[in-house]
Image (tube, helix red, strand yellow):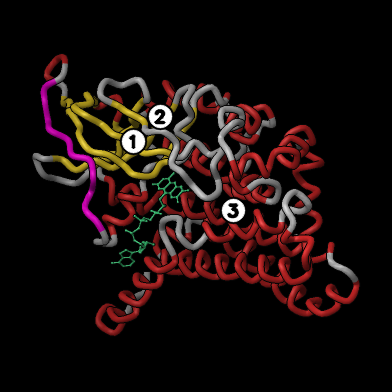
Amino acid sequence: MSTHASLCGLAARAPALAAWLDAHAETLDTDATLSGDVVPQLASAGLLRIGVPAELGGAGGTIGDAIDSVADVAGHSFAAAFVLWGQRTFIEYLLQSPNRGLRERLLPALLSGELAGATGLSNAMKYLCAIEPLQIRATQTTGSNSAPAWRVNGGLPWITNLRKQGFVAAAAVDHEAGGAPSIFAIAHHAPGVARSDDLDLIGLRGTNTAALQMTDTPLTEDDRIAENAPAWLTRVRPAFLGLQCGMSLGLARRSLTGTHDGGPGARAAVADDVAALTEQLDTLTARLKTGVAQGEFVDTPASLFKLRIALAELVHDAATLEVQTGGGRGYLRGVSGVARRQREAAFVPIVTPSLVQLKNQLAAQRAQQPKTGTVS
Ligand SMILES: Cc1cc2nc3c(=O)[nH]c(=O)nc-3n(C[C@H](O)[C@H](O)[C@H](O)COP(=O)(O)OP(=O)(O)OC[C@H]3O[C@@H](n4cnc5c(N)ncnc54)[C@H](O)[C@@H]3O)c2cc1C
């Protein structure tokens, strides 16, 4: 796909949303005044239903289409794309959850944008790599009709899309009684749930990013997304990461397109680099979408990790080229999106799974390779 074709994509398919994002991209990055509007804007353009089966209220299509939609939005506003990632990933959790009752209860409001979906699974992903312990603990109690029930305590320091008007957040919970940790959906109005003020971020400030604390919050089987978090996360990870990589695809594409705004001399100087990065981007996009669609990355996550690393490096290189061709114009406030895209690009390596985390994981797998003979 050419860089230009995709940028035209959202403007052609959802012109009102594209115009809104272009008009407010700077605000969405620098303050929270429009943070309540992002999910409804994405919903009214139909983006939350992409890749969701029609029989469940979606628009049909594939997870690859959903990745494209995240990329398209990221080309206009990375903050909005991050919100879309959170919302669409939560929807994916429900699609891949065995808990049909929970799906039927939450999906309609999530698809219409009335309810925000937040994914607080960084802690779980870091836990799976032995980087940190789970930060929420569940004590078993007895619910009605002797059904299992729990009280949970703990917190998550970072979650995006905790929309003040109403949200549900996915979190991994360690069971005091032992056994595999579970993933629960925690509603904003559940007893003992407290959202902090928005975190004081250097960018992405319109994303409703805050901390979440649970104190004796009661949960039941009705709230459980997955009983065995490690097994379920292995299956969901390709969609989670694929949608997240969509943000990198869109940002890199936008920066490469931005290099065309430079003067003829500047364009000529970087033409070979831009052509090489564009070709690499097209190859990585195709590999990502094919791998996620074919379920290839469930058994071979290392290939997905390598794609995530390659895309993050590409985002960095593309953003740097855009700075070079933009000259002093890029350093002036309110004249171009060059400076904003520098801040946006700075986020790509740190969102979980972070680049350093993945590099360590790949190194650990390589060290094991002679013993097991496999790289997964
Ligand atoms: C704006 C913003 C929004 C966010 N939104 C969400 C969200 O919606 N949901 C969510 O769950 N999280 C979210 N996060 C958290 C994010 O995904 C990262 O988990 C977080 O920034 C990294 O955690 P930390 O800074 O506490 O890392 P630290 O634990 O301080 O570690 C620093 C870095 O080193 C890496 N690291 C630490 N120990 C090791 C090790 N042993 N081996 C390899 N690497 C290691 C970490 O991965 C990290 O990259 C958000 C963060 C930001 C900044």
Which amino acid does the dot numbered 2 rest on? Val
Q: Secondary structure at mark 1?
A: strand
83 w.r.t. 143: above or below:
below
The residue beneath circle 3 is 246
> How far apart, in angstroms, are the residues tagged by discs 2 and 3?
23 Å
Query: Which disc is residue 212 wearing?
Result: 1
The residue beneath circle 2 is 168
Which amino acid does the dot numbered 3 rest on? Gly
> For this rendering, which residue is in front, 181 or 321?
321
Compared across the picture, whether 292 is left or right of 146 comes to right
Which tag, 2 or 3, sits closer to the chain's start?
2
Which tag, 2 or 1, sits closer to the chain's start?
2
Q: Residue pushed farthest bottom?
A: 370
> How far apart, in angstroms, are the residues tagged by discs 1 and 3?
26 Å
Magenta region: which residues? 132-142
Magenta includes 134? yes
Disc 1, ligand 1: is the CB inside 8 Å? Answer: no
Q: Position of residue 58 (x, y in %)?
A: 59, 30
Q: Residue at x 62, y 29 (%)?
A: 43
Q: Position of residue 344 (x, y in %)?
A: 59, 55
